[in-house]
Amino acid sequence: MTAGRPPRVLIDATSVPADRGGVGRYVDGLLGALGRIIGSELDLAVVSLRTDAERYARMLPAAEVVAAPAAVAHRPARLAWEQTGLPMLAQQLAVDVLHSPFYTCPLRAGCPVTVTVHDATFFTEPEHYDKSRRTFFRSAIKTSLRRADRVIVPSKATRDELIRLLDADPTRIDVAYHGVDQAAFHAPTEEEKARVRARLGLGDGSYLAFLGAKEPRKNVPNLIRGWARAVADRPNPPALVVAGGQGHDDDIDKAVAEVPAHLRLLRPGYLRYADLPGFLGGALIAAYPSYGEGFGLPILEAMACAAPVLTTPRLSLPEVGGDAVAYTSEDPDQIAADLAALLDDEPRRLALAKAGFDRAKEFTWESSAEVHLAAWTRARDRRSVD
């Protein structure tokens, strides 16, 4: 008999990258919330890369944390291990449900499987991915929709696109919005803002912020072009700081080459986690003119840092931003016009900052954890009945 007792769930965290990008924020946030319900509502096990095992053991003292083989740190080996070693581990740990948090899952796990599909942009925005990446993730998503007992998505927009494009079964899809860590992402103090400006070499200068991967879907080249057009003729034009991983958008260098010499564009790469509130909250505008997102965690994190946000109304972004952000299009001329309008309207920027900060409080990892737990319980109970 399984009904009535907490489900024993194994979460495969081996896909979490060292840089703690989107999937890392998701897994870490989810695990942090789950850690508070272990025992009464959940029996949790986690398998992670060896470099993360000690960290998760400290974070989750009541969970069973297992280090994966060292070779799993390399993606091809991880994908092979996922199909063989992970099912064996699930069997050894006698789990009720195996959760795969990043698109792929074992084809034969020996127990119910749930999987998180973060977005459908490999189908809706195929031109923004190289062929091998597009082919791999399209196949992985189709397989997960077919084989997983339940699929978890971070937005209604992603659910609707999977149903529309792939005829996914809506009764097996659960929408679990991401949360935001209010301790890590908060309205910064003036000291935090000044520290980031000093680290970036900005002094007392103002700036616009982008934080995210430099992937074609993020539309960074048109942001650069829009910013340059919006500020080129202004006295003391604000800089643009494009922070985050390097990605694989070759058009960024072309856009950078077009920037007038008197404007300042900074590309500092990854910023320290502790600097993110000061970076986002210290910006005149946090700009994120994406072609489409499965959720849009960067805009939620910027909102939590009390930054006025400019984004696009594509896919899930209006679900996150609502009326608390400003919207633009993906076109550089429109980005320029909307950036200029915001730069000239301080009262609106202040109103957006407050509205975004308040709205961000509605997105919690505790709420996300509740949806995940309900999905795991349904997967376990359905399989036990079948």
Image (cartoon, rainbow, N blue to C red):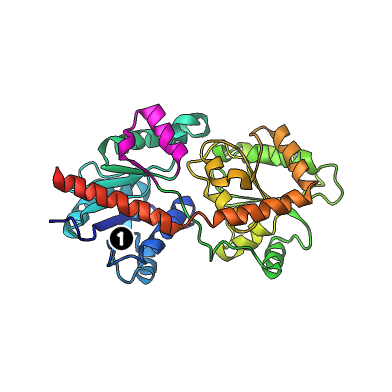
The x, y position of residue 198, in whole percent, is 72, 65
Q: Which residues are magenta?
A: 155-175
| Residue 210: % across, % down | 63, 49
Residue 283 appears in which quarter of the rendering? bottom right
The three-letter amino acid code for the residue at tag 1 is Val
Q: Is residue 234 left or right of residue 323?
A: right
Q: Position of residue 238 (x, y in %)?
A: 77, 51
In the orientation shown, which residue stands out farthest toward the left?
Answer: 1
Residue drawn 68% across the image and 50% down it:
352
Residue holding disc 1: 46
Q: Quadrant of the N terminus?
A: bottom left
Instruction: Report the number of discs.
Output: 1
Residue 290, placed above or below residue 44? above
Quadrant of the snapshot with the C terminus: top left
The majority secondary structure of the magenta stretch comes to: helix
- Residue sitting farthest toward the right: 235
Decide if residue 284 is in sight here: no
Q: Is residue 236 visible?
A: yes
Q: Residue at x 28, y 62 (%)?
A: 41
Camera-nearest residue between 263 and 364: 364
Quadrant position of residue 304: bottom right
Q: Secondary structure at mark 1?
A: strand
Say if the magenta span includes residue 301. Answer: no
Going by the image, does 339 lie left or right of 34? Answer: right
Q: Residue at x 33, y 33 (%)?
A: 142
Badge 1, how many Cα within 10 Å: few under 14, some, many 20+? many
Residue 171 among those drawn in magenta: yes
Is residue 192 shown above or below 160?
Answer: below
Q: Is residue 40 found left or right of 129 in the rendered image?
A: left
Residue drawn at 50 percent across, 61 percent down: 181
Place of residue 3 in the rendered image (x, y in percent of width and height, measured from the top left): 18, 55
